[in-house]
Amino acid sequence: MITLLRNPKQIITANSSGKNYKRGKEMSDIGVLTDHSILIADGKIKSVINNSSINKAKYDKEINLENKVVLPGLVECHTHTAFAGSRAEEFKLKLKGVDYEEIAKLGGGITNTMEAVRHSSFDELINIITPRIKYFISQGITTLEIKSGYGLSFYDEIKLLQVIKELNKIFPIDIISTFLGAHTFPPEYKNDNDKYIELLTNELIPYVAEHKLAKFCDAFCESTAFTAKQTERIFKVAEENGLKLKLHTEQFNSIGGLEVALNMNAVSADHLEVLKENQIDLFFNSDTTAVLLPGVSFFLNYDYAPARKLIDANAIVALATDYNPGSSHISNFQLILSLAAIKMNMTIEEIISAVTINSAKALDVSDVSGSIEPGKNADFSIFDAVDYSEIVYNVGKNLNVMTIKNGEIIYES
Ligand code: NIG
Ligand code: FE
């Protein structure tokens, strides 16, 4: 079965010539094609052809994309979509000047959401999360990462990971799960942190790995959560169990997390809002993707990560929403793109690389997604625009009108 995506105004290939990521200056080259069409065979990209060589008789199906812009299916590489409850009350406190870390110290924050998750059944969680995933799909997202981290007990962390696994079966996109048991210390282990780390390393991580409930192990390395030493201890066990690594680090404090992530070849280091000048060069030629989350800086009204300096220092930079109930209650992907342009001084081309090929790299799936190259999954987001800059210019407006996953239309507005 051969499908033709006929004659879009532009195709943004994000082609990386087989390298499967873009670092530094390479992020400016997004491979814009005009007068071309795309051929799909068996759910994969077969070829990108010049319109002059279209031969009508040959195709089983045609999708007319006149006056549309085609991008690779967008990859959202950092979310906490699997939460229950609401933190609107904390938001009100925040508006009165109480900051995120203070709220956490008062027993709110992650622990607040943990209570709501513990009180929700498997089916309730599926129902709560379902519309959120539909919203991501409507925005052109074809690969979505979701973390656990609001269960914080053996039973509830496994419940969350099983919910994510089930959602991956229900929805046609790829949902990639990350184990974030090391999100914070739950109240019952407040005075015995070591015991919680033992629960993570002796019981949870081996179980998660054995039952293939997550691809990644993540941790929150901060003064209100896990130290660099504790993070390293958890990561060593995760690595031994075959999980790949990601780290929340340098969000509020720089306490050695980044160095652990880089030394252990984490797939990504996420946040980096308080990255120090002398840490920027650590990303030069590093294979660890810097995942930046401007929604957090906007929502909490504090520093933005130094995107410009990282790109100028030859880093591999990706962008994501960090969608969660406390620090970035934002699931609008287009808004994140615009924030990256306006607040972090990234160019539109760099932003597109950051949410396609580089965010695929941050999930270790860029060999099969993130760019329009023959052999990769036929995943596309189709925008109602005649130039790709419209996607970033239309702040917070969803211009995606069609989402295609493995060659099939899964959303159409
Ligand atoms: O990425 N920082 C830790 N985790 C989330 C926030 C989670 C929450 O507040 O519920 C983040 O910012
Ligand atoms: Fe996060």
Image (cartoon, helix red, strand yellow):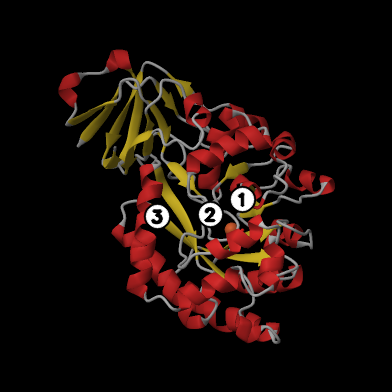
Image position of 61 with respect to 157: above or below: above
The amino acid type of the residue labelled 1 equals Phe
Residue 227 x %, y %? 74, 70
Q: Is residue 298 left or right of residue 50?
A: right
Residue 262 occupies which quadrant of the picture?
bottom right
Element carrying mark 2: loop
The amino acid type of the residue labelled 2 equals His
Element carrying mark 3: helix
Q: Residue at x 32, y 33 (%)?
A: 46
Indicate which quadrant contains ligand 2: bottom right
Q: Earlier in the sequence, mark 3 or mark 1?
A: 3
Image position of 362 with respect to 165: above or below: above
Q: Residue at x 38, y 36 (%)?
A: 381
The amino acid type of the residue labelled 3 equals Arg
Q: Earlier in the sequence, mark 2 or mark 1?
A: 1
Q: Is residue 295 left or right of residue 379?
A: right
Q: Nearer the viewer, mark 3 or mark 1?
A: 1
Give the residue number, with chain letter if any, for mark 2.
329
Q: Residues within 10 Å of mark 1 (few under 14, many from 20)?
A: some
Residue 56 x %, y %? 18, 20
Element carrying mark 1: helix
Q: Residue at x 37, y 27 (%)?
A: 384
Q: Dots 2 and 1: beta carbons under 8 Å?
A: yes
Quarter of the picture containing the C terminus is top left
Residue 322 x %, y %? 55, 53
Distance from mark 2 CB to nearest ligand 1 atom below 8 Å:
no
Give the residue number, with chain letter if any, for mark 3.
132
Quarter of the picture containing the N terminus is top left
